[in-house]
Image: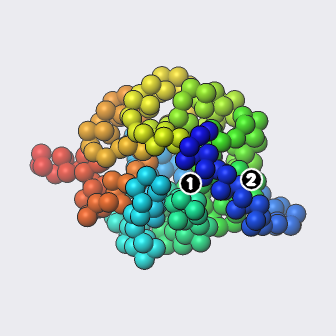
Amino acid sequence: MENILETIVVAKKRRLFAQMKQYLLTDVACFFANPQKSAFLASLRSSGPNIIAEIKLASPSRGRFISRQDVPYFLSSYEEGGAKAISVVTEEDYFQGDSGLLREVVQKTRLPVLRKDFILEETQLYETKEVGAHAVLLIARIVSKERLKHFVELAELLGLTPVVEIHDERDLEKALFASARVVGINNRDLSTFRVSLETTLRLLPFIPEGIVVIAESGITTRKDIEVLFEAGVRNFLIGGSLLSSRDPIQKLRELQGEEEVIARH
C-alpha cells in the first residue's frame, strides 16, 4: 500500500480505534440466526449485463458527486433504469459516507445492497449485518491473506455475500486462498487512482470457472461494457458515470444496450 490508499487505511484504523463499538455475545449470536440466501448473489446470476449502481457522495480523485438529499432521486432512478443491485460507499473521511447512509439506502430501495468500505475489523461486518445490507466488499490488498479468509468465512456465516476486490495477481492469489466466490476486479489502482480496463482483461483468464466476476471502475460507455462482456464479464459496478449523468435512467439503459434495441425497432 502507498500514497492515497495507505493514507485512507491509516485514517480508517484511527477512526475504528476511536469509535469501536462493542457487541455483546447475545447481539453477535442474533446476527448468525437464520441466515438467508443472498439476494445480492442471486442478482448477478442472469446473463447480463448486470449493473450494480453506486451511491457515492464524494471521492479523493473527483471530489463531491452528490449531496445526501440527492440519494432518494438516484435510488429511484437506478430502480427504474434496471440496475440489479446498489453499492454504497460508507468510508467517512475521503468519501463522505457513513453507516447512516448505508441504513438509509437499505430502507429506501427494494434492490440488494453492497457495502463498500475499508474493512479492517470484525465489528464492521457485524455493523453491516445489523444495518441490513446484503453484501460487503473486502479489499484484498489491505489485509493479510489469513485475515481475508477469516473475513470471507465470517461474512458468509452472517449471511452476507463477501465480494473480494482485487487489482493484481497478488491480490488474486489472496482471493483464491480465501475461497472467494465473488471477485471484483478494480480497474482503478487504489494507490495511484489510475484507471485501465486492461486490468480486468489481464486478470480474467486466471480466475477459475464458477467464481462470479464483477468489473469495477472506469466503465463509462456502452463500448466499455461490450469489450468486457465479449471477454466474459457479466457484472459491472458503475458509479461516477451514473452519478455525474443528467439522466441516470437513460444512462443506465444506454449502458445496458436498451437504447440500441429501441432504435432497431
| Residue at 82% over, 65% down | 23
Q: Is residue 120 visible?
A: yes
Point out which mark residue 14 bears: none
Earlier-in-chain disc, 2 versus 1: 1
Q: Is residue 70 left or right of residue 1?
A: left
Q: Is residue 59 left or right of residue 20?
A: left
Position of the N terminus, as image quadrant, is top right
Q: CA distance from mark 2 to mark 1?
A: 14 Å
Percent coordinates x, y for residue 210 in the rendering? 55, 31
Q: Is residue 60 left or right of residue 124?
A: left
> Three-letter amino acid code at disc 1?
Lys
Q: Mark 1 = which residue?
A: 116
* Above or below 245: residue 257: above
Instruction: Kindly state the secondary structure of the residue where label 2 is placed.
Output: loop
> Three-letter amino acid code at disc 2?
Glu
Alpha-carbon neighbours of circle 2 within 10 Å: few (<14), some, or many (≥20)? Answer: some
| Residue at 71% over, 50% down | 120
Percent coordinates x, y for residue 135 in the rendering? 60, 53
Percent coordinates x, y for residue 40 in the rendering? 54, 52
Residue nearest the viewer, comparing 183 with 14: 14
Q: Mark 2 = which residue?
A: 121
Taking the view exactly as shown, the residue that stands out farthest to the right is 25
